[in-house]
């Protein structure tokens, strides 16, 4: 059995992908992922263990079926959860569909959903009814594979706030070996 200690980060970038071109850094989802990496670099106690560091770059122009897809699967197999960045720029790309289908459908990984365009709990949650706002739920339609498989695993929905992300990363309810019941979760206002 694999040692599943990584956090697999799923985010949209246009394809073909090159980390060195300005287009990647201009993509909100990719920039959000890079900020997670920066938080970890600045504070070794920040609980982010990047599964993308576990093997070679998967968006390097290699063959999808022979190289890229198996690498994604390997990373997901060694992860305890998925951090999904979901924003207005997210597109239903081949890579994101595969990450979600395999990560949720085959591996049962809990998902920490981070909305980079929102900073506060009240931005994503209706604090009076303790429900996720319709505006946020409409973002789920950008990635139908995720929307349609959310009921299979626990998902926690967060604004892009460091302390909330840190709490979710430390929360054993959103780790594969100790996950809570499937459902939609969030930190109340």
Image: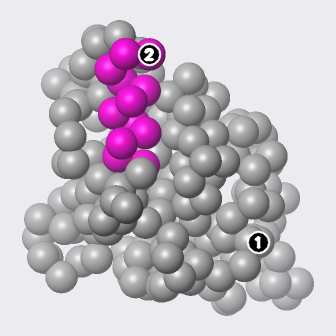
Measured in 3D between alpha carbons, the distance from the residue under mark 2 to the one under mark 1, in whole angstroms, is 32 Å
In this view, 32 is above or below 25: below
Q: Is residue 180 above or below residue 5?
A: below
Badge 1 crowding class, 10 Å Cα cut-off, few under 14, some 14 to 19, many 20 or more, is few
Reading the image, the residue beneath label 2 is: 65
> Observer-nearest residue: 160 or 78?
78
Position of 122 compared to 119: left or right?
right
Residue at 26% across / 65% down in the picture? 49
Q: Position of residue 54 (x, y in %)?
A: 21, 48
Q: Residue at left 28%, top 34%?
A: 25
Q: Main secondary structure of the magenta part?
A: helix
Where in the figure is residue 188, as x and y percent of width and height? 68, 88
Q: Nearer the viewer, residue 88 or 147?
A: 147
Asked if the stretch drawn in magenta spans residue 181, the answer is no
Residue 183, numbered label: 1
Q: Compared to 148, does 154 lie above or below?
A: below
Label 2 element class: helix
**Boundaries of the magenta span:** 65-76
């Amino acid at each position: 059995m694999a040692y599943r200690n990584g956090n697999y980060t799923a985010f949209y970038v246009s394809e073909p992908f090159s980390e060195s071109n300005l287009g990647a850094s201009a993509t909100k989802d990719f920039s959000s992922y890079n900020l997670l990496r920066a938080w970890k670099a600045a504070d070794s106690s920040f609980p982010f263990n990047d599964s993308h560091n576990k093997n070679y770059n998967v968006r390097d122009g290699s063959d999808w079926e022979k190289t890229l897809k198996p690498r994604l699967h390997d990373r997901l197999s060694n992860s305890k959860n998925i951090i999904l960045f979901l924003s207005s720029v997210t597109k239903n790309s081949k890579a994101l569909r595969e990450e979600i289908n395999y990560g949720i459908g085959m591996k049962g990984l809990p998902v920490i959903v981070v909305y980079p365009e929102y900073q506060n709990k009240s931005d994503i949650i209706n604090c009076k009814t303790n429900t996720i706002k319709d505006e946020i739920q409409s973002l789920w339609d950008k990635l139908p594979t995720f929307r349609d498989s959310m009921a299979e695993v626990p998902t926690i929905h967060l604004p892009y706030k460091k302390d909330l992300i840190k709490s979710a990363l430390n929360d054993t309810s959103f780790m594969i070996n100790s996950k809570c019941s499937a459902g939609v979760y969030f930190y109340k206002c």
